[in-house]
Image (cartoon, rainbow, N blue to C red):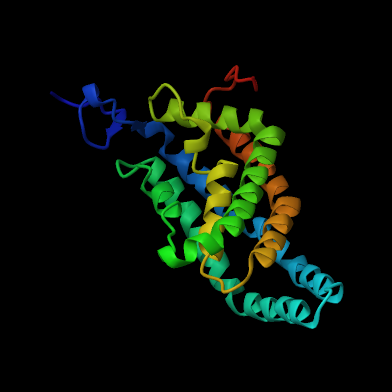
Amino acid sequence: MVANDNIISFGGSHKDHTPTLNSAYQSAVKECRLLVVNSLPKCFSFFDSLDDTLFDHADKADSNKKQEEFFVAMRQLRIVQGDIKKQFSQLILDDFDALWSSAHTKQAHQKLESISEPDSELSLLQNADLEEDIAIKRIASKGQANFGNELGQLSDRFSHMLNIDSVIAIDNPLSPDSIIKHLKYVISPLPVSISIKLVIYKQFELQAVTELGKLYQQLNEKLISNGILPNTGYKVR
């Protein structure tokens, strides 16, 4: 059977409901990717104030040991900051690119959630893991609450471009849930305590979440300018 020239199929049959990207939208995808690339540095603005924030925590520490912990973390973050930014950006772009290809699966999310520790250390990390999970869920919830409408519209437009009924928000590669899990993944190797990680998450929440909202708006405007679902009808429930 001859394939329609206007549809790019990434394998599989119609019975498998394989997402297919309309060739007319290829340029729109490239334009959106460029917006993502240009917006990512703004998501790292929290690093600019992170050093000062950690210094303030060190200054208020109730013991020399705790103070030294913050100072050591400051030095470590200065050293690895470039690598964190690079890896974080690449994970986001890989997810974005995968959305438009046959390789789009949940493997990335499974990888992010597969970070494990030796059994002997699990009990010691339970409380820290709980605190980290709470921080992550708070950030994802804040992003959804503040920009759920924009994200929903973006997901609808992505779905339309892929000829599928819907893209659940949590599977959108640019959703707050996906983004914050990438942050968790890239900072997980850092030899710092949970108190340091919570400071990092808080600074990200205060400064980067707003930038995500701006990105959603820019992407929606770009897709509308390309004639893609000018009115999605999506409203936060």
Which one is in front, 189 or 171?
Answer: 189
Which corner quadrant holds the N terminus? top left
The residue at the far left in this view is 1
Q: Is residue 76 above or below residue 155?
A: below
Residue extending farthest top:
233
Residue sitting farthest toward the right = 60
Number of disc labels:
0
Asked whether the viewer can see residue 105, the reply is yes
Q: Residue at x 57, y 65 (%)?
A: 85
How far across and down, in percent of the image, does residue 149 sit? 65, 28
Q: Which of 51 and 91 is in front in this view?
A: 51
Report x, y in % for residue 152. Answer: 58, 28
Q: Where is residue 75 drawn, in percent x and y? A: 67, 81
Residue 39 visible somewhere in the drawing: no
In the image, is residue 160 above or below residue 70? above
Relative depth, front residue between 215 and 53: 53
| Residue 237 drawn at (x, y percent) | 64, 19
Name the quadrant containing residue 140.
top right
Residue drawn at x 46%, y 46% as measured from the top left: 96
Using the rendered view, name the quadrant where residue 194 is placed.
bottom right
Query: Taking 52 as reference, is 232 left or right?
Result: left
Q: In percent of the image, x 63 and y 69: which residue is there?
A: 193
> Is 233 displayed left or right of 107 in the figure?
right
Examine the rendered structure and indicate whether residue 145 appears above or below residue 36. Answer: above
Q: In which quarter of the image is residue 46?
A: bottom right
Against 175, residue 186 (above or below) is: below
Name the residue rendered at 59%, 38% in the picture: 219
